């Protein structure tokens, strides 16, 4: 084999599970099976190359300056990509290949290039570690330096371990998942997130190894400063994740400066179904998935920076439970709501801030460049103005941000004094450093500038002395500097010219004077490029030393941006400041759906729930009248209040809820062999096992997936169970077409009937008024709605006849014959499983 191919195979052997991009000059090349795969996936030409063997090696390549786009395509298709770089600058006359090393391995959870990332969404990689008593979850985003860990015990999971793990993962929606060899829920994780887990070897989860990995990375003797002790079950998951990141990033993880444990129960809990049903960050309808305008995030996101957008998304995913923290955020939002002029000035400054978190991650990595540093400089120049906007604020959170805001003027001054105004993309071509910053560099730059003049003067002298007017002094990377003379002037070439290369139409020569001049220029240029690179690396090292300062300021900018965004939205959309407390009351006057009111005209509605006489609202009325919208609206307003946002209402009092559950819609799960009704009952079972008195439950059409009597019986029993203070007693919105359930208002304390009003025009036409009123509905108007959907007239006529017959025969249940449940029915004996969910009976 050729020396270069020997080098290639050495690197390929070390990265056998990756597609290896091997840098050759201005291209990244792939060989053999890698080339065949890349040619197919990227639709690029497959060629061949001699490699010292009889057959040619299959080869394809991509330009180095466009490689990130191709890498993105390969990673998106599920491949791991190892990037092998030239670690030296090729020098004229240098024999043998330059040194090459793999500088990074790109996987879905470790991408850092902006081409591959959604700027307003974190790119999380998760590691799950199953223990005998529970499961630990570690999550990291190397593009921002985020590194968190949590643990939940079997007792917390109440017999639904796999579902509890997936629900916790839904807070992050990972791009990549790491598990141990014996992790039992790998298939469930892949089904839930369309991400095939990567299996790590057992030794990476060793407690001692993981603990040492973490302390070595953070340069600490122990982890107590992060709130962790050596024997804590979170350690193996965090250590295994960090080991994987070090392996793929080749140690370039300076942006990860801390590890933050969090308590899963420290935030409002929502399962994966609830997050989807409420359309918090992703639209429910598949054809709207790329349009976030149909989500709560789309309404609330008026952020000006990518950092603020990601933080706002995190707030929506993790609503607060702590009332003082909620009030503090609400007060800060209120101040920006009331300061429209100051807010506009702040927004102008924030818009000039680049993504400092991800810039820092790239700068410490192998692909950080001068343009990243220039973007950081362009951001830092605006920090003093942003700090100035905070100086007269009064809300405690805003005052705290002003007090701790580091405007990083010294870092800006350092970068601005050294870095060129428009640095090139490559670090190995020069042009990175300003003239006047370094004396030695200025001398080398002077030689470079004068070198061009010296060569021009030499060309003029040689033309005059030889009489060859077409003589040229030129340069290329292979032969260096040379004098070129066409074949027609060969007779005039002086004897002291030394032939260097023969071409078809010309000869190339050198002279002693040219060699000496070339040596001076080339050495100066090589020294200049190397010196500029050394100076740039010094700048980068100084930035890394100040990593925590820069990250803290970036974090403050993100918080400020998210808060002003909530203030801007509240001002624009006429939201009110909710009163949030630890009580059990949810009172909303003239509440509106935050998303739908942006799309169409909207009819406001009131809501009043509490832990006593108004625990449950049984809502009846026709399809399309607005029941589902109304119930989601109440859940969204409650959630908005708990993230510290103003809400779409005239007035709102929100008693903090610990969980929000939604059971809406109908769908099957063909992959696991579950019917629509089975999926419905599974979700209902989950709610009944985990809801507490402090929860908010939204249930829509329970029991509709089976026969009328079966469905009514189930809905009846579920309603009783939720309404009973001995079992759950949670605040509940319960929509149903079973009008028989309206008798519950008379039979059970805490239950009240509501319905949506409907206007009628003759027997055929209905008018949806979208207004909720006290009292139950006596009809569902299904046939009228079916007519609006376009069912054939003959079908509608037949349905009306059947309905008349059934109504005359009174074929439905006489609810008076159903006995109320005895107290023992809801006792410990019948519902002993409640002890698993932590609900006291």
Image (cartoon, grey):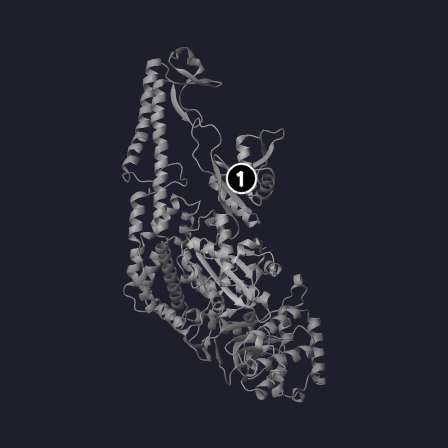
The one of 613 and 743 positioned closer to us in this rendering: 613
Q: Quadrant of the N terminus?
A: top right
Q: Quadrant of the C terminus?
A: bottom right
Q: Residues within 10 Å of mark 1 (few under 14, many from 20)?
A: some
Which secondary structure lies at badge 1?
Answer: helix
Q: Which residue in the structure is indicated by mark 1?
A: 11
Residue depicted at x 48% and y 29%: 96
355 horizontally vs 198: left or right: left
Q: How many marks?
A: 1
21 horizontally vs 563: left or right: right
Image height of 378 relative to 556, above or below: above
Residue 784 image position (x, y, % from top left)? 63, 74
Image height of 467 relative to 170, above or below: above
The one of 316 and 98 positioned closer to us in this rendering: 98
- Quadrant in the picture for residue 498: top left
Image height of 642 relative to 724, above or below: above
Visible residue check, residue 767: yes
- Quadrant in the picture for residue 405: bottom left
Residue 258 image position (x, y, % from top left)? 42, 58
Residue 824 image position (x, y, % from top left)? 62, 86
């Amino acid at each position: 084999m050729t020396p270069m191919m020997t080098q290639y195979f050495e690197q390929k052997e070390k990265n056998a599970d990756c597609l290896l991009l091997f840098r050759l000059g201005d291209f990244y090349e792939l060989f053999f099976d890698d080339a065949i795969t890349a040619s197919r996936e990227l639709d690029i030409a497959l060629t061949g190359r001699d490699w010292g063997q009889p057959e040619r090696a299959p080869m394809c390549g991509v330009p180095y300056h466009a490689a990130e786009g191709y890498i993105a395509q390969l990673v998106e298709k599920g491949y791991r990509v190892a990037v092998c770089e030239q670690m030296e600058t090729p020098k004229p006359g240098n024999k043998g290949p330059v040194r090459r090393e793999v500088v990074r391995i790109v996987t879905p959870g470790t991408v850092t290039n902006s081409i591959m990332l959604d700027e307003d969404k974190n790119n999380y990689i998760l590691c799950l570690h199953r223990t005998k008593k529970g499961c630990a979850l570690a999550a990291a985003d190397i593009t921002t330096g985020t590194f968190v860990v949590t643990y939940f015990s079997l007792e917390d999971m109440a017999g639904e371990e796999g579902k509890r793990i997936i629900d916790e993962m839904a807070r992050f929606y990972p791009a990549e998942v790491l598990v141990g060899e014996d992790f039992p829920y790998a298939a469930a994780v892949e089904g839930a997130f369309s991400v095939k887990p990567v299996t790590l070897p057992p030794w990476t989860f060793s407690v001692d190894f993981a603990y040492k990995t973490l302390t070595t990375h953070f340069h600490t003797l122990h982890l107590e400063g992060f709130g962790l002790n050596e024997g804590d079950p979170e350690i193996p998951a965090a250590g295994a994740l960090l080991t994987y990141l070090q392996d793929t990033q080749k140690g370039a993880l300076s942006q990860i400066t801390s590890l933050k444990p969090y308590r899963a129960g420290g935030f409002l809990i929502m399962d994966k179904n609830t997050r989807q049903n409420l359309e918090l960050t992703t639209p429910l309808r598949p054809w709207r998935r790329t349009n976030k305008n149909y989500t709560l995030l789309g309404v609330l996101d008026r952020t000006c920076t990518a950092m603020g957008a990601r933080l706002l998304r995190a707030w929506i995913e993790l609503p607060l439970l702590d009332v003082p923290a909620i009030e503090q955020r609400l007060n800060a939002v209120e101040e920006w709501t009331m300061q429209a002029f100051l807010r506009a000035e702040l927004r102008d400054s924030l818009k000039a801030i680049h993504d400092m978190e991800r810039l820092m991650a790239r700068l410490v990595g192998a692909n950080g460049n001068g343009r990243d540093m220039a973007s950081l400089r362009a951001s830092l120049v605006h920090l003093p103005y942003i700090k100035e906007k905070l100086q007269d604020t009064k809300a405690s959170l805003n005052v705290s941000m002003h007090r701790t805001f580091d405007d990083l003027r010294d870092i800006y001054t350092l970068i601005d004094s050294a870095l060129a105004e428009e640095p090139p993309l490559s670090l190995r071509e020069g042009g990175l450093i300003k003239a006047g910053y370094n004396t030695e560099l200025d001398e080398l730059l002077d030689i470079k500038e004068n070198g061009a003049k010296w060569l021009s003067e030499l060309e003029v002298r040689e033309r005059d002395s030889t009489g060859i007017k077409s003589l040229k002094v030129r340069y290329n990377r292979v032969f260096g500097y040379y004098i070129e003379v066409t074949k027609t002037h060969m007779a005039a070439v002086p004897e002291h010219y030394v032939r260097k290369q023969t071409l078809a139409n010309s000869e190339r020569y050198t002279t002693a004077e040219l060699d000496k001049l070339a040596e001076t220029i080339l050495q100066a240029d090589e020294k200049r490029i190397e010196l500029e690179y050394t100076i740039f690396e010094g700048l980068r090292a100084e930035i890394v030393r100040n990593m925590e300062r820069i990250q803290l300021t970036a974090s403050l900018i993100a918080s400020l941006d998210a808060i002003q965004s909530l203030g801007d939205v509240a001002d624009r959309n006429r939201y009110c400041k909710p009163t949030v407390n630890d009580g059990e009351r949810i009172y909303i006057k003239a509440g509106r759906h935050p998303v739908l009111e942006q799309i169409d005209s909207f009819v406001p509605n009131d809501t009043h729930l509490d832990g006593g006489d108004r625990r449950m609202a049984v809502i009846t009325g026709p399809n399309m009248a607005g029941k589902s919208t109304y119930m989601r609206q109440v859940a969204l307003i409650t959630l908005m209040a708990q993230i510290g946002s103003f809400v779409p209402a005239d007035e709102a009092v929100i008693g903090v809820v610990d969980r929000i559950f939604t059971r809406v819609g109908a769908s099957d799960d063909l992959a696991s062999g579950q019917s629509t009704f089975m999926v419905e009952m599974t979700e209902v079972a989950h709610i009944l096992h985990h809801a507490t008195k402090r929860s908010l439950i939204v249930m829509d059409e329970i029991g509709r997936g089976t026969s009328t009597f079966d469905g009514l019986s189930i809905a009846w029993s579920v309603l009783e169970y939720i309404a009973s203070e001995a079992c759950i007693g949670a605040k509940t919105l319960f929509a149903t077409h079973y009008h028989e359930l309206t008798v519950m208002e008379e039979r059970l304390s805490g239950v009240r009937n509501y319905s949506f009003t409907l206007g009628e025009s003759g027997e055929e036409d209905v008018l949806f008024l979208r207004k909720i009123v006290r009292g139950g509905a006596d009809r569902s108007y299904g046939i009228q709605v079916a007519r609006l959907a376009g069912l054939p007239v003959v079908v509608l006529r037949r349905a009306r006849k059947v309905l008349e017959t059934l109504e005359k025969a009174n074929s439905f249940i006489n609810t008076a014959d159903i006995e109320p449940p005895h107290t023992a029915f809801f006792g410990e004996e019948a519902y002993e499983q409640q002890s698993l969910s932590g609900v006291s009976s």
